[in-house]
């Protein structure tokens, strides 16, 4: 078996063994479902409630990727501005740091008060969580360009666009993707935390609302089913950006060799 195939099977086998042990312990100890449901019961609950849970999952996914897209575009543009003008970074970076270090659960109630649309407020809360890693990583990447290459571009009187296209963007790309990988998971966490804080009800609600509803009814299997969807979404986001990293950097960057 090839080493890459072995690396793919080992975590899958470990997860299956853990699920099997979980099922065996619940059945052997005859634990009631409201204390710890068996994996088979969680899957059954997920299937029975698939319409409601998948609708909530779709809302959480749209919120996560919407905020991540805004964070990627805004972070990259602001990083380019920071890298081109140091005084702009000195003026604006404190605000970015304040947003990063302030717990989202502390400012979400204020945002929900000031923003009329609940969906827009949730999107803003999620964006705040996802924005800073992309900004800081991209700034570092733009400033990590080889100084000898910088001198060479200056010697040949390259234009700003040529320096950006052929020197700064390739230098910043690995850092930008690393920021995306961090922000991908954070945006999902931010979306769920913002939904918990908002406590929204109605059609446009996400997985956090389903978990809250299930907790009010002590419906533990449904809580686990919603958590399972959340975890699978986080894993899918991680694998998506891993694939993007291999596609963008696999042919030339040392980290992929």
Image (cartoon, rainbow, N blue to C red):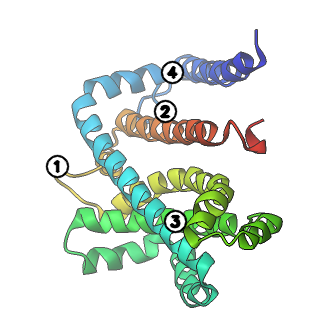
- Specify which label sits upstream in the sequence, 2 or 4: 4
Query: Which residue does the numbered mark 4 point to in the structure image?
Result: 30
Residue drawn at x 65%, y 55% is 170
Whether residue 215 is visible, yes or no, is no
Q: Residues within 10 Å of mark 1 (few under 14, many from 20)?
A: few
Where is residue 40 drawn, in percent x and y? 44, 19
Label 2 residue SS: loop
Query: Which residue does the numbered mark 3 point to in the structure image?
Result: 76
Question: From this viewpoint, which residue is outermost toward the top?
Answer: 1
Label 3 residue SS: helix
Residue 230, placed above or below residue 221: below
Q: CA distance from mark 3 to mark 2?
A: 44 Å
Query: What mark, if any, has residue 203 been given in the picture?
Result: 1
Residue drawn at x 70%, y 16% is 5
Q: CA distance from mark 1 to mark 3?
A: 34 Å
- Specify which label sits upstream in the sequence, 3 or 2: 2
Residue drawn at x 38%, y 39% is 226
Label 1 residue SS: loop
Front position among marks 4 and 1: 1
Whether residue 227 is visible, yes or no, is yes
Q: Is residue 47 left or right of residue 71?
A: left
Residue sitting nearer the eye, 181 or 223: 181
Query: Which residue does the numbered mark 2 point to in the structure image?
Result: 36
């Amino acid at each position: 078996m090839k080493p890459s195939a072995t690396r793919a099977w080992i975590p899958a086998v470990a997860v299956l063994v853990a699920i099997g042990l979980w099922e065996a312990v619940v059945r052997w100890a005859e634990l009631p479902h409201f204390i710890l449901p068996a994996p088979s019961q969680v899957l059954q609950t997920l299937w029975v409630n698939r319409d409601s849970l998948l609708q909530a999952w779709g809302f959480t996914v749209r919120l996560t990727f919407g905020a991540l897209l805004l964070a990627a575009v805004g972070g990259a543009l602001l990083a380019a501005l920071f890298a081109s003008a140091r005084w702009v970074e000195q003026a604006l970076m404190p605000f970015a740091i304040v947003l990063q270090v302030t717990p989202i659960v502390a400012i979400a109630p204020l945002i929900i008060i000031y923003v009329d649309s609940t969906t827009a407020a949730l999107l803003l809360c999620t964006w705040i969580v996802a924005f800073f890693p992309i900004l800081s990583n991209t700034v570092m990447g733009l400033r990590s360009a080889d100084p000898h290459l910088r001198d060479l571009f200056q010697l040949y009187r390259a234009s700003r666009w040529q320096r950006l296209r052929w020197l700064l963007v390739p230098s910043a790309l690995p850092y930008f993707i690393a920021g995306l990988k961090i922000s991908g998971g954070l945006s999902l966490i931010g979306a769920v935390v913002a939904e918990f804080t908002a406590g929204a009800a109605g059609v446009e609600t996400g997985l956090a609302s389903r978990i809250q509803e299930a907790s009010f009814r002590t419906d533990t299997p449904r809580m686990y089913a919603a958590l399972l969807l959340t975890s699978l979404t986080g894993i899918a986001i991680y694998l998506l950006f891993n694939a993007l990293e291999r596609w963008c950097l696999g042919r030339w960057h040392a980290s992929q060799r």
